[in-house]
Amino acid sequence: MKHQNRLQEIFTKYGIVFVLIVMIIAMSMIKPSFRTLNNILNILTQCSVYGILALGMTVVIVSKGIDLSVGSILALCAVIAASLGQSSTASTKYFANMAELPIIVPILAGLLIGAICGAINGGLIAFTGIPAFIATLGMMTICRGFAYIYTSGKPVSTLIPSFEFIGQGRLLGIPMPVVIYLGMIIITKILLNNTRFGKRTFAVGGNINAAEVSGVNVKKILLWVYTYMGMCAGVAAIVSTGRMVSAQPGLASGYELTAIASTTIGGTSQSGGIGTVWGAVVGALVLSVMRNGMTILGIQSYLQQIVEGVVIIVAVILDMRKNARKA
């Protein structure tokens, strides 16, 4: 009986890792081209943008929140950063009389816009009592609207070479998007597991009333939680812009759902107070491997969306059953 309980505990804790391993082995047997180095790096690169969003979403959901605006925030950050990173040879410049700026300027602009949008989300949720679902749904529409107004619905292209390096360059043979993703994994893990902010975020998500009684400034924590989510959207925007060497206002539509899916599949509980950075990473990899595998097998993109939806529902059901057993 103890042996059975131990196995059940291991599967509950590491089940999604086993699923990922089985998926990789199965796809490698069905399609040998799946296990090539180029395809593995391609999977990791594709995973980088919504993987970064999933890291921020993990922090949000651990606090028992949700953020539906990250895709639109990403798009707004991307078009603003791209407009500041245009080359002098661009035929249509957003700032005609401005000289080429160093890459740090559009990067900081993207991060700042993301942080501001996230802070507005956090402020609304913390200080007005508006449910996170409503506040971020409104921000989703606002940011997307601003992105279209800013660009007049047109793409921003012809960027400086530094942007191309961010999205398509390599460092020691590793694609830069993957390098940036790894950096964000380390930062988020330290933030969530080794700081007072992280401990208090878990406390707020686990029991907000108990957190308040114990002296946690819940409003401040929520403000910073959503600000960090916004900054993650800004980082993802820079990576995405670099990969395409352009940006458009319709960018990242639906990415918020992919981020939520990655986080949920990785074991972060929608009930709050439970979640890990590595779970979010594994969840994002599961979706990337699944999408890549279905593409290699020639499965239609519309059917891929259906499969992804089913996986999300199953993950939430398993999460609910796990929490019910603990209760």
Image (tube, rainbow, N blue to C red):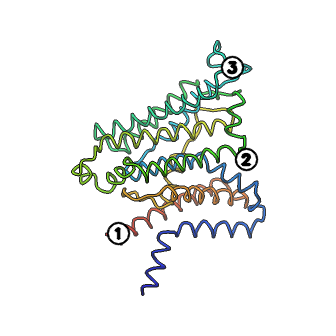
Amino acid at pointer 3: Thr
C-alpha span from label 3 to label 1: 57 Å
Label 3 element class: loop
C-alpha span from label 2 to label 1: 47 Å
- Pointer 3 or 1: first along the chain: 3
Q: Are marks 2 and 1 in contact (CB under 8 Å)?
A: no
- Measured as percent of width and height from the top left, residue 88 is found at 71, 19
- Pointer 2 or 1: first along the chain: 2
Q: Nearer the viewer, residue 84 or 199?
A: 199
Amino acid at pointer 2: Leu
> Residue beneath label 2, please?
172
- Measured as percent of width and height from the top left, residue 52 is found at 55, 46
Residue at the spot 34% in from the left edge and 53% down from the top edge:
205
- Pointer 3 or 2: first along the chain: 3
Label 2 element class: loop
Q: Are marks 3 and 1 in contact (CB under 8 Å)?
A: no
Label 1 element class: helix
> Residue beneath label 1, please?
324
C-alpha span from label 3 to label 2: 35 Å
Left or right side of 275 for 259: right
Q: Residue furthest left?
A: 213
Residue at the spot 49% in from the left edge and 55% down from the top edge:
277
Amino acid at pointer 1: Ala
Q: Residue furthest bottom?
A: 1
- Measured as percent of width and height from the top left, residue 100 is found at 67, 20
> Residue beneath label 3, please?
92
- Measured as percent of width and height from the top left, residue 298 is found at 73, 58
Q: Quadrant of residue 35?
A: bottom right
User: Tag 3: Cα neighbours inside 10 Å, few (<14), some, or many (≥20)?
Assistant: few
